Image (cartoon, coloured by chain):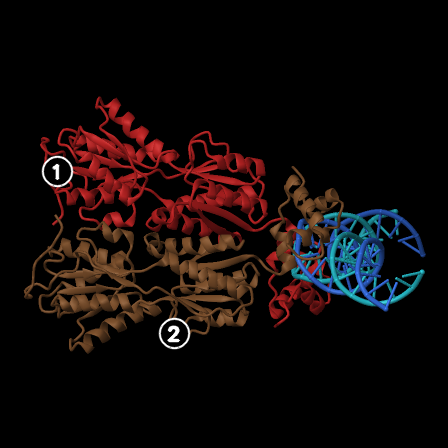
Chain colours: A red, B brown, C cyan, D blue
Amino acid sequence: MKRRVTILDVAAEAGVSIASVSAALNGRPGVSEATRQRIAEVADRVGWIPSMRGRSLSRKRAFTVGLVIQRDAHVIESDPFFAGFLGGVESVLVDGGYALVLQVGESRTATLDRYQRLVLEHRIDGVFLTDIEDQDPRFALMAEAEIPVVAVNSAPGCPFPSVRQDYAPGLRQLLDAILELGHRRIAHVTGRSGYIHSGQRERLWRETLRSNGIRPGPSVSGDFSIQSGSRAADWLLATRRTRPTCVVCANDLMAVGFIARASDLGFDVPGDLSVTGFDGIEFGAYTRPRLTTVSTAPYALGEAAARSLLASIEGQRPDDVDIAPTTMLLRESLAAAPGSVCSSSQQGR
Amino acid sequence: MKRRVTILDVAAEAGVSIASVSAALNGRPGVSEATRQRIAEVADRVGWIPSMRGRSLSRKRAFTVGLVIQRDAHVIESDPFFAGFLGGVESVLVDGGYALVLQVGESRTATLDRYQRLVLEHRIDGVFLTDIEDQDPRFALMAEAEIPVVAVNSAPGCPFPSVRQDYAPGLRQLLDAILELGHRRIAHVTGRSGYIHSGQRERLWRETLRSNGIRPGPSVSGDFSIQSGSRAADWLLATRRTRPTCVVCANDLMAVGFIARASDLGFDVPGDLSVTGFDGIEFGAYTRPRLTTVSTAPYALGEAAARSLLASIEGQRPDDVDIAPTTMLLRESLAAAPGSVCSSSQQGR
DNA sequence: TCCGAGAACCGAAACGTTTTGGTTCGCAAT
DNA sequence: ATTGCGAACCAAAACGTTTCGGTTCTCGGA
């Protein structure tokens, strides 16, 4: 077992005190350029890398931030948001010398426990809050703990620094396009209730239709999983009377599930009815028909969130950040309403 | 700013030394049951939770393990393996009081750097090695660092404790089924070269066909991305002469890409040709046709890997563990070869 | 009554950094 | 020659645990 090389070894080898070594390699004043060079050279030669353990204790910093994602194992498997988000977060953290500890909570309370433990054990210096709920219990916890927080896609007026990508522009474009194409019976499949983005998307759907003089079609509740999209198709396509000509799903997964089930039931998308998603996952370009959706940028969101969090940790009060808003991604699954004036089916094949 | 409550506060409040507090709450002998009770009660009342920082330094343990996933941001977005794997890992770690730091490396060297840094900074007590390559440079690094390692789906004879799910049974079932259905021109779309699982899958495909007296059809190289599956379709379906009746893809994503492109080119799957995947991602059940594939268990693999790693860290030499092997998942995308005796098309719709 | 052996408890060191509060030194100004 | 003053450097404390090596106490046995 090799003994670990510490700052003491470097100091001894270079013939200086450990204080000088620390000052030299952290770029603090009080050490001449000549000795700084020498110390750096020695440190390099003996292969010294400061131990995070000692450093954390001394600096009262963990140099680590936390993220707890709350998904049951089933949904998470195909959730495309986090991979991109993580990539963005990581790319920024690594430059700052920070690491990310990631946990998954299976339930609401489990998630809360994980956060609490990470914070109270002083494992982390800051946290990301994603998938924010209407009265999110994590807010109180974090306020109590006085730990830096960045909220991702939170509601306006959130008490913590936030980064957001405005969902509205893309969704509005989408709804406009839908109306333009002659659809009048427009249903919605919601996300899991309680989440702020679920509410936002449904509200915008409802209000846009109302302000266009259209009674919002049925709204069935999903939970962001493919399966729930599939179930929604069963509900919405059951009776001819209530059948919509267009279904706006709160995310792409549900849209995929919906289309798959609709196809089983003998419906042609977009010939018989159009279906749209939200997120812009890569898969959407490979379904047939290709999925019309709203394109989001999880990677950029992750970058912004990480930057904001690091700033918070450095003691700044970062402004809220808005990255470039969402945009519509028009593809085959949305077409003219059946029986409408300009009804030209444009399926694949 | 509230002052942090430390072990000193507990000791003072309970009227004992800090050594006793530590012993009491860590279940070490040398403290009477009565005082143990009292200390526990006091600790609870003042809300003391041992700081990981002090604890890490003293115990020479970070109580953290590391995983670096190597994907460029593009591929990772839709990679379904890691989410499940992470879930399994996490569920075990949390019980052991461990946390996971997760990083993503965009390139081979970046990944290596991340691992190196995590280890040298003493941030982690052990690492997971996934997506193992043929001569994986991480092996040498970890051996040099003398840090606990668990290799996931490594080749037999791997110098580190390993957890595996045997890919062969499921894949063999699949190939048998393909042959049974009368296919004779059977192509393969490989995974990214250099990875051990890419090689394994291609080798089994090749050898099984040979031993059945069939010349393995063309093998085109992919990289596990949807896009590469799509490109493979362009290659394989270009000329009538070389066209296979069945295409075995090294993972589900490529199969999805392949099917999508094949459909664009006017081919009917499985009427004109069959396509199979590998992984058993949830999406496969929602494509039309549904994807025939080999079902894997990333969650269980994660659990086993985490258990093994924790055992290593505790100083044991865990045996290699094999979780239940893969099995075939027969769905619509595989059907009888066109023109074969029992050719009954069974598409969806 | 004395001795010896555990049990219970404690003080202090150790872990590896950063940071604080000096001390020494050289040099310019007086 | 003395003083003053930065620059360079250092010893020691601090961070919050765990653990090592004692010390005291109690109690049973001789």
| Mark 1 neighbour density, 10 Å: few (under 14) some (14–19) many (20 or more) | some
Q: Name the side, left or right, on which B345 lies relative to A180.
A: left
Front position among marks 1 and 2? 2
Say which amino acid is labelled 2: Pro
Which secondary structure, mark 1? loop
Q: Name the side, left or right, on which B260 lies relative to A137.
A: left
Say which amino acid is labelled 1: Asp
Q: What is the x, y in percent for residue A346?
A: 12, 42
Which is nearer the eye, D3 or B38? B38
Q: How many marks?
A: 2
Numbered circle sitting on residue A272: 1
Q: Which residue is mark 2?
A: B156
| Image quarter (top left, top right, bottom left or bottom right) of the N terminus of chain A | bottom right
Q: What is the x, y in percent for residue B91?
A: 45, 53
Q: What is the x, y in percent for residue A336?
A: 14, 35
Mark 1 near mark 2, Cβ–Cβ under 8 Å? no
Name the residue located 57 percent from the left edge and 49 percent from the top edge: A123
Label 1, label 2: how far apart the Cα atoms are: 54 Å
Which is nearer the eye, A306 or B38? B38
Which secondary structure, mark 2? loop
Q: Chain of mark 1?
A: A
Q: Where is A291 relative to B113, above or below?
A: above
Name the residue located 26 percent from the left edge and 64 percent from the top edge: B250
Q: What is the x, y in percent for residue A126?
A: 53, 44
Q: Where is A88 relative to A210, above or below?
A: below
